[in-house]
Amino acid sequence: MIDLEKTLFDICLPLVDDQKALSVKTMATTNENEILLYVYANSEDVARLIGRKGIMASSIRQMMSIAARDVHKRISVKFEAY
């Protein structure tokens, strides 16, 4: 089975300047069919990860939904600045 936290971390790592500040955490949800992942980084890096009009964030979410297909759960990715 895929480690979704590690996969998301590996996707985001080359996109940020401060790689030491990047972290990915799995949060609890009330829906058992959903996995909630939070990406934490510096505010400049979060802006880069979201991209103009959310294009980059949408692409990251799409890649993660493909990675999560074998666990048969819906995945949500949120971006937060420190």
Image (cartoon, rainbow, N blue to C red):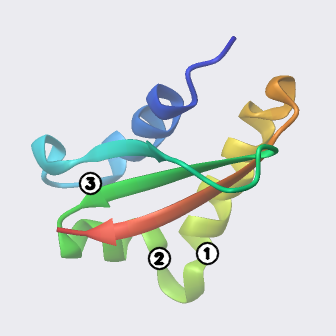
Q: Residue at x 82, y 40 (%)?
A: 73
Question: Of callouts 2 and 3, which one flags the residue occurring earlier in the amino acid sequence?
Answer: 3
Badge 3 local density, few (<14 within 10 Å), some, or many (20+)? Answer: some
Badge 1 local density, few (<14 within 10 Å), some, or many (20+)? Answer: few
The quarter holding residue 63 reads top right
Q: Are marks 1 and 2 in contact (CB under 8 Å)?
A: yes
Q: Which residue appears farthest toward the bottom when viewing the image?
A: 53
Q: Residue at x 52, y 50 (%)?
A: 37
Question: Of callouts 3 and 1, which one flags the residue occurring earlier in the amino acid sequence?
Answer: 3
**Mark 3, residue position:** 16
Mark 2 to mark 3 CA distance (whole Å): 12 Å
Q: Quadrant of the C terminus?
A: bottom left
What's under tag 2, amino acid-wise?
Gly
**Mark 2, residue position:** 51
Q: Residue at x 50, y 85 (%)?
A: 52
Q: Position of residue 77 (x, y in %)?
A: 57, 58
Q: Secondary structure at mark 2?
A: loop
What's under tag 3, amino acid-wise?
Val
State left or right for residue 61 relative to residue 34. left
Q: Secondary structure at mark 3?
A: loop
Number of the label disc, if any, that sits on residue 20: none
Q: Position of residue 46 (x, y in %)?
A: 32, 69
Q: Are marks 2 and 3 in contact (CB under 8 Å)?
A: no
Q: Position of residue 56 (x, y in %)?
A: 55, 67
Q: Residue at x 21, y 74 (%)?
A: 44
**Mark 1, residue position:** 55
What's under tag 1, amino acid-wise?
Ile
Q: Nearer the viewer, residue 62 or 78?
A: 78
Q: Position of residue 61 (x, y in %)?
A: 66, 56
From the viewer's perspective, is residue 4 above or below residue 12? above
